[in-house]
């Protein structure tokens, strides 16, 4: 008994590649002429290869930016679970990378004494859940050493098909800024205090100069 095999040719739909290329062209900052030439060609394998290279490059750029950005930043899901953060956020909060990976609520890191009263979380919720726009405000966090740290909070929500997908948050430490203002204020007010003390001692012959 003889068996005959029949080879069949299967048609593949590569239209998804063109959709992906369209999105990449719309969102990617830089595509080289050589990459563009391949993306406009009829070779689906080469197109896919270039797409992977572009996405890997963009991911590396983002990772470099995130890790070298000189201010603490993090990202959460709508359920407030961390998806990513940078080294400055670990330094600011005192929590390690492995610890943050296993935290199920950002509030437990930002306001550990009473997560439901997290001040940063209230600002984030105002903009990403209620007003659905980017925004900013002033708040405080409590770090791992139980220090209260005043911070500037900037919120950038990202929506997908009209639904909140994730929220990026920048948290800038304001302690140095507040200390500088305090020093400046003390320097400006000190002559007035000194003159008032003189006045209290009846030394009224000198004019007050600011």
Image (spheres, rainbow, N blue to C red):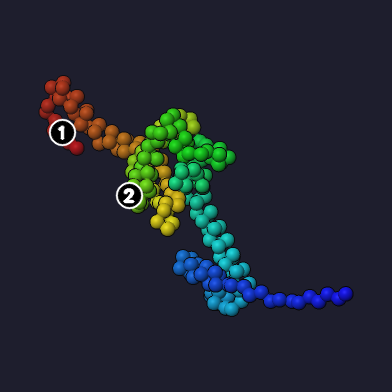
Count neighbours of disc 1 (C-alpha within 10 A) and say few if under 14, some if 14 to 19, many if 20 or more.
Answer: few
Q: Earlier in the sequence, mark 2 or mark 1?
A: 2
Percent x, y of residue 100: 53, 40
CB atoms of marks 2 and 1 within 8 Å: no
Residue 22 in picture, x, y percent from top left: 49, 70
Q: Which label lies toward us, 2 or 1?
A: 2
Between residue 134 and residue 42, name the one nearer to us.
Answer: 42
Q: Residues within 10 Å of mark 2 (few under 14, many from 20)?
A: few
Judge from the rendering whether residue 143 lies leftward or rightward of residue 122; answer left or right.
Answer: right
- Residue at image point 34% right, 41% down: 138
Name of the residue lying farthest toward the bottom = 42
**Residue furthest out toward the right:** 1
Q: Quadrant of the C terminus?
A: top left
Work out whether residue 95 can be spotted: yes
Residue at left offset 36%, top offset 40%: 122
* Residue 148 x, y percent position in the rendering: 40, 32
Question: Which residue, given by chain and number where applicable, does mark 1 sit on?
Answer: 208
Residue ranking furthest to the front: 1
Residue 70 shows up from this direction: no
Q: Which mark is residue 131?
A: 2
Q: CA distance from mark 2 to mark 1?
A: 50 Å
Count of numbered circles in the view: 2
Residue 140 placement: quadrant: top left
**Residue at position x 15%, y 22% from top?**
200
Residue at 44%, 29% in the rendered image: 113
Disc 2 on helix, strand or loop? helix
Q: In this picture, is 147 found above or below 124? A: above
- Residue 120 is situated, as x and y percent measured from the top left of the image, at 39, 40
């Amino acid at each position: 008994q003889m068996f005959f095999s029949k080879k069949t040719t299967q048609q593949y739909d590569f239209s998804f590649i063109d959709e992906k290329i369209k999105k990449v062209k719309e969102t990617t900052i830089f595509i080289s002429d050589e990459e563009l030439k391949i993306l406009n060609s009829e070779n689906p394998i080469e197109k896919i290869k270039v797409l992977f290279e572009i996405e890997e490059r963009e991911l590396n750029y983002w990772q470099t930016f995130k890790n070298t950005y000189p201010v603490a930043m993090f990202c959460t899901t709508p359920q407030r679970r961390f998806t990513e953060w940078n080294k400055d956020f670990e330094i600011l909060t005192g929590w390690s990378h492995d610890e943050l990976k296993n935290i199920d609520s950002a509030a437990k890191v930002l306001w550990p004494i009473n997560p439901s009263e997290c001040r940063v979380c209230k600002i984030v919720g105002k903009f990403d859940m209620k007003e659905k726009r980017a925004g900013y405000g002033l708040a405080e966090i409590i770090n791992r050493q139980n220090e209260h740290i005043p911070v500037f909070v900037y919120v950038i929500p990202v929506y997908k098909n009209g639904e909140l997908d994730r929220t990026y948050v920048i948290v800038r430490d304001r302690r140095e800024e507040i200390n500088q203002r305090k020093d400046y204020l003390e320097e400006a007010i000190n002559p007035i205090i000194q003159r008032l003390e003189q006045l209290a001692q009846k030394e009224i012959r000198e004019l007050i100069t600011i």
